[in-house]
Image (cartoon, rainbow, N blue to C red):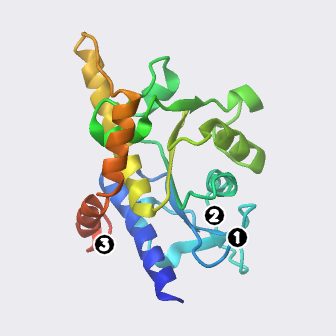
Amino acid sequence: MSPQLAELLDDLAAANRILAHYGVLDGFGHVSARHPERPGCFLLSRSLAPELVTPADVMTFDADSNAVDGDDRKPYVERYIHGEVYRARPEVMAVVHSHSPSVIPFAASSVKLRPIYHMSGFLSGGANVFDIRERFGCTDMLVRNTAQGQALVAQLGADAVILMRGHGFVAVADAIPLAVYRAMYTELNASIQQRAIGLGGDVTYLDPQEAALADAANRVQTARPWALWKEKVRSGPA
């Protein structure tokens, strides 16, 4: 194994544990990374609670979200979310799928999740909502195949975050630390936005230009929180 791949696997395991530690993931949800050495492939843990993921649990999947190298361990059902993001968005290097509780109401409400402070400038004009029922009728709400993954990614477009009605959200980025950052601050923004709405007055959100400037500034500083978050989970499970 190359040093680059070993480091990426370590970061991927850490990302799972970090998001579990802070309640963005629980027994469900997952984090993936594009394979640095095998074009068209991505890395994702076997079906396991995120808090328990280690580098040894990571599987390699091809562009169609099939396990490679004869790996017959049980995969996540919703690996198609990751596979179709990587197929459609060549600049994306990491994907997070979460069911974090503060975000769910915005996926079920006409109130849009919008950036309320500088840490969430990546939400820009607000997060769109993917409603699986519009294309596939009544389902168990899981993204179980290529067609459903492609529909979600079409709704995501070029954005950083897409909400999923009755389900959760997906955050994407060009590196694992930034994907974790976006997942963390999607949940925090949702919580803060609900509190601001609850005050009963008018809520002032970031202007699109403010959001873009804040996002650009924060993107170059992700190493600071990433180092802290990794230290929090360095000794083992969260």
Q: Earlier in the sequence, mark 3 or mark 1?
A: 1
Q: Residue at x 38, y 32 (%)?
A: 209
Q: CA distance from mark 2 to mark 3?
A: 23 Å
Q: Earlier in the sequence, mark 2 or mark 3?
A: 2
Q: Is residue 11 visible?
A: yes
Q: Amino acid at mark 1?
A: Ala
Mark in the foreground, 2 or 1: 1
Q: Pick whichever, 129 or 220, lies toward us.
A: 220
What is the x, y in percent for residue 228?
Answer: 23, 63
Tag 2–tag 1 contact (CB < 8 Å) = yes
Can you say whether 125 is above or below 188 in the image? above
Q: Residue at x 63, y 73 (%)?
A: 60
Mark 1 element type: loop
Q: Residue at x 76, y 32 (%)?
A: 136
Q: CA distance from mark 3 to mark 1?
A: 27 Å
Q: How crowded is the residue under tag 3: few (<14 C-alpha within 10 Å), some, or many (20+)?
A: few
Can you say whether 1 is above or below 62 in the image? below
Number of marks drawn: 3
Q: Is residue 187 visible?
A: no
Q: Which residue is mark 2?
A: 75
On residue 236, which mark appears? 3
Tag 3–tag 1 contact (CB < 8 Å) = no
Q: CA distance from mark 2 to mark 1?
A: 8 Å
What is the x, y in percent for residue 45?
Answer: 54, 67
Q: Amino acid at mark 2?
A: Pro
Quadrant placement of the N terminus: bottom right
Q: Pick whichever, 85 or 216, lies toward us.
A: 216
Q: Pick whichever, 62 or 59, lies toward us.
A: 62
On residue 67, which mark appears? 1
